[in-house]
Amino acid sequence: MNSTIATLALQALLGRRRFLLLVAFPVLMVALTTMITVMTGLEDPAWTLVGELGYTLVLPLVAILAASSVLGPEVDDGSIVYLLSKPVNRHVVAVSKWVVAWATTLLVGAGSVFLAGVVAGGGDRAAGWAVAGLVAGTTYSALFLALSALTRHAVVIGLAFVLVWEGLLGGLLSGVAWLSIGQWGARVGHELSRDLPDPVGLPWAIGASVVVTLAALWFAGDRLRSFALTGDE
Amino acid sequence: MSTIELAGVSRWFGNVVAVNDVTMTIGPGVTGLLGPNGAGKTTLMAMMSGFLAPSAGTVTLDGQPIWRRTDAYRDIGLVPERELSFGYLTGRQFVLANARLHRMPDAAAATESILEVVDMVEPAERRIDTYSKGMRQRIKIAAALVHDPKVLLLDEPFNGVDPRQRMHLMDLLRRLGDEGRTVLFSSHILEEVERLARHIEVVVSGRHAASGDFGAIRRLMTDRPVQYVIGSSDDRGLAALLMAEPSVTSVGLRPRSGIDVQVSDLGGFATALPGLARRHGITLVELTPSDESLESVFSYLVSRQESLR
């Protein structure tokens, strides 16, 4: 972990307009949950929002925006050469950038899911979703960072992964849960509250999350090591 | 003292060959990499700075390959052509971050002294996105020099820099070269390279077209056939006289007025023309080189190189 790179990444994240978008979705989600709770007085619709909107959509969206903001623009316009023309291990560069995206995802993404859970009724169920958010937020941010190091279409591919693979296909085919970051996190959260889904075995959920996180970070570092400046010619 | 060596280096992108079998050695002192736009200068620079793998051949710094070797950057300072996109930082913050990334013991002091060297102390507190092109260029050079590298690679460093600052930067690079550092800069402007570089490498269409000191390159360029347009009081009379000159290879009359002349021996022509005009009472009103564009100079060098093979 290199504090200079992390500081620059944080400045890049906060300095871009994308950051407003990153905060807007969670704020809207919490506001919506609050409105539903106050207006209907029922817990069920509010919990649906926490799980279906907050955890399934807003959390990965925050991870995509955070991960792509700390790395994407610099890779796209090539200005990352200013960071890479330094004797700093590329995996350290990747991890330092990830730490910023990760902290943002946990704070804004998982934090807002927890907040919405507290509004919806609190208790173990809110804690369960928060833990699920911490686990999935960690894996999501690492995976999307690797995507940002690989392609300039990281945001689109990340969205497709979340919406089509985890969302659409995950809803139709139960087997997708074995390869779904969201389901792994939910399974870990299930340990705190039976209200969360139980789609796969706990060891698998934990093991797969750890493996994907580490592999993604290693891959992102390796891509940076092979970063090619092609020039305009 | 550090040396960059390219041995049989080629680089292609799909079907396009950007660099074709280049072998050159860049040693201490200032070297200019001269070539028209699109000649492959940036591709060569990218390979020398470890940001591109050669498709064939090897690029080494003091015997060690540069590609995928992060430690090489201890000795390399790089000024890419690429715009700075760290607009949200001040100049000082940017240079300081570079010093810290090199783990300099006193990054703050190194930053201040290099800001002074490039004459950027006064605007250092302003954000980079408020800088002019020349200021950005100077802050990029400061960032590349902050760790006192043995090798300095600069891609088109004088683009957009005003003449006074250009002089200043040239003095700086010359000084760095005199100190025994290996300084390589690319440019498509002959005058720039001539004024600064002791040694010149010329690349055209991805090929290594010429190599040598400034005098040798200049001679190559002046020996080539040159075309002039001459305006005079008696074009037809002068044309007849010119044809008799050994240094002249062809003469043609222009449609309205003026003469097109192709000259093989520039020196002989330059001494002969005034006397000729004087003896025959012809007044010269114009003498303009008509193909002084760098492209024609380069294409001559390439055709010459090919005929030597």
Image (spheres, coloured by chain):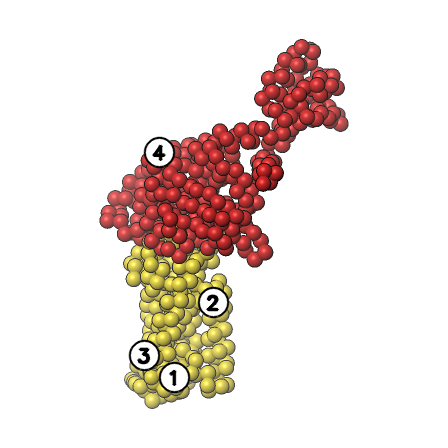
Chain colours: A yellow, B red
Residue at point 48%, 84% (across, down): A171
Q: Is residue A227 visible?
A: yes
Residue type at mark 3 is Val
Residue receiving disc 2: A155
Kindly identify which numbered label has been placed on residue B178. 4
Mark 1 or mark 3: whose residue is earlier in sequence: 1
Spatial separation of the CA atoms under disc 1 and disc 3: 15 Å
Residue type at mark 4 is Asp
In this picture, is A39 found above or below A59? below
Spatial separation of the CA atoms under disc 3 and disc 2: 25 Å
Confirm or deny contact between disc 4 and disc 3 (CB under 8 A).
no
Q: SS class of the residue under badge 2?
A: helix
Residue receiving disc 1: A47
Chain to which the residue tagged by mark 2 belongs: A
In this image, B184 relative to A194: left or right?
right
Mark 3 or mark 2: whose residue is earlier in sequence: 3
How busy is the neighbourhood of tag 3: few (under 14 within 10 Å), some, or many (20 plus)?
Answer: many
Chain to which the residue tagged by mark 1 belongs: A
